[in-house]
Amino acid sequence: MSNNLSKRIWTGGLFLFIGIGILLHQFEIWDFGYIARTWWPLILIIFGFVQLINRKNSSPVVSLMIIIIGGLFLLNQLTDINLTAFIWPLIFIFIGLAIIFSRRRHHKVFDSNHSIEAFSFFSGTNLRSQSQDFQGGEVMTVFGGAEIDLRDVIISEKGANFDLTSVFGGIELIVPENVHVEISGLPIFGGWEDKTRKVAKNSDTPIIKINCVAIFGGVEVKD
């Protein structure tokens, strides 16, 4: 089963369940409001299991964390123990660790004349490079956005490596035509989209490897 088909089935199933639940509530067959208020964490748990089974670009650690968070919320709903105060600190701790270790794992030293490095916090950034030996770089946005224009660069013979981190924000990366783009990374309630024209990988094709960390945010790559 393709990833897109799986997403459509789960999304359609969720709306189908909500519709049937509301309809049965109108006929007073069950109290859908109570069920929704009490059992909504099951959505997180099911989503985590689906990501764990069908993971392609996502880390299993993310899926397990979503399952754990959903379980804690559910336990908080079904018992008299107030776990809410512990859930949100755990979420922020996990996000912080995910950002730190993801960036360290892909760390590379770049020539500052042929790379891009930027950080935006509650702001927007527009970057453009015309490097004739472009190597990549690192861009992070937190509650902000960035637009990176690489249409005029020539990719280094060794390829280019980009670390893109978007936290509650968005990054748009415009790459040159006729380059091969490889994207991987860590999505946490976020993701990325590759809108580039697919170029076959061979010995002469310039390659851009992109590592994305998308936390409640998104990354869009196009040419």
Image: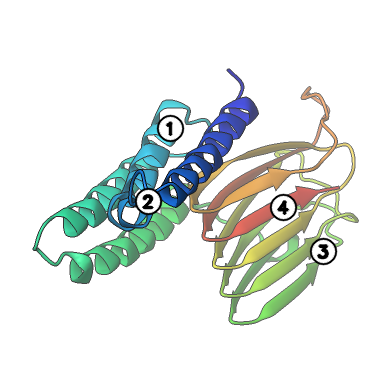
Q: Amino acid at mark 3?
A: Ser
| Residue beneath the point at 75% across and 56% down | 173
Q: Secondary structure at mark 3?
A: loop
Looking at numbered disc 2 in the image, what kind of residue is underneath it?
A: Phe
SS type, badge 4: strand
Mark nearer the viewer, 3 or 1: 1
Q: Residue pushed farthest front?
A: 27
- Residue 204: x, y in percent? 83, 27
Q: Residues within 10 Å of mark 1 (few under 14, many from 20)?
A: some
Name the amino acid type tagged 4: Glu
**Residue 57 visible in image:** no
Answer with left or right where residue 28 lies relative to residue 176. left
Q: Position of residue 106 (x, y in %)?
A: 49, 48
Which residue of the protein is positioned furthest toward the left in this rendering? Answer: 80
Q: Could you tell me which residue is drawn at 37 percent across and 47 percent down?
A: 44
Give the x, y percent position of residue 219: 66, 55
Q: Which of labels 3 and 4 is toward the front?
A: 4
Label 3 CA crowd tier, 10 Å (few <14, some 14–19, many 20+): some
Q: Secondary structure at mark 1?
A: helix
